[in-house]
Amino acid sequence: MKHMILAGSLLLASGTASLADGLFWVVGNRATGKCDIVTSNPVINGDIWFGDGPYKSKADARLARSTIRACPAPTPDDEKAEDGTN
């Protein structure tokens, strides 16, 4: 019986973790003075001073970042780094 309960709880935990896959958040980072797009739900403390989301696509998160007054406009270099291209 204990094995069944353990197996059920592990299955439930893995199922809820997969629900966050493919989601994006916009976070304000005090250390860099920028707003970053991240793929995990942010913890608001220390250098991370706000989080907004989740968004279903990176394009949606970028659009949201452009409407947040506290976020400076990203430079072309920042956008290239975000895309993973050089």
Image (cartoon, helix red, strand yellow):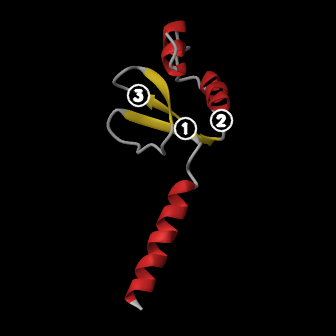
- Residue 57 vs 6, above or below: the answer is above
State the separation of the CA atoms marked 3 and 2: 21 Å
Which residue: 40% across, 79% down?
6
Circle nearer the N terminus (3, 2) = 3
Q: Residues within 10 Å of mark 3 (few under 14, many from 20)?
A: some
Q: Residues within 10 Å of mark 2 (few under 14, many from 20)?
A: few
Asked which secondary structure carries label 2, the reply is: loop
Viewer-proximal residue among 12 and 38 = 12
Viewer-proximal residue among 28 and 37 = 37
Q: Quadrant of the N terminus?
A: bottom left
Q: Which residue is mark 2?
A: 57
Q: What amino acid is labelled 3 in the image?
A: Asn
Q: Which residue is mark 1?
A: 25
Q: What amino acid is labelled 1 in the image?
A: Trp
| Residue 3, image x, y percentages | 39, 84
| Residue 2, image x, y percentages | 38, 88
State the separation of the CA atoms marked 3 and 1: 12 Å
Asked which secondary structure carries label 3, the reply is: strand
Quadrant of the rendered image containing residue 7: bottom left
Q: Which residue is mark 3?
A: 29
Viewer-proximal residue among 46 and 5 = 5
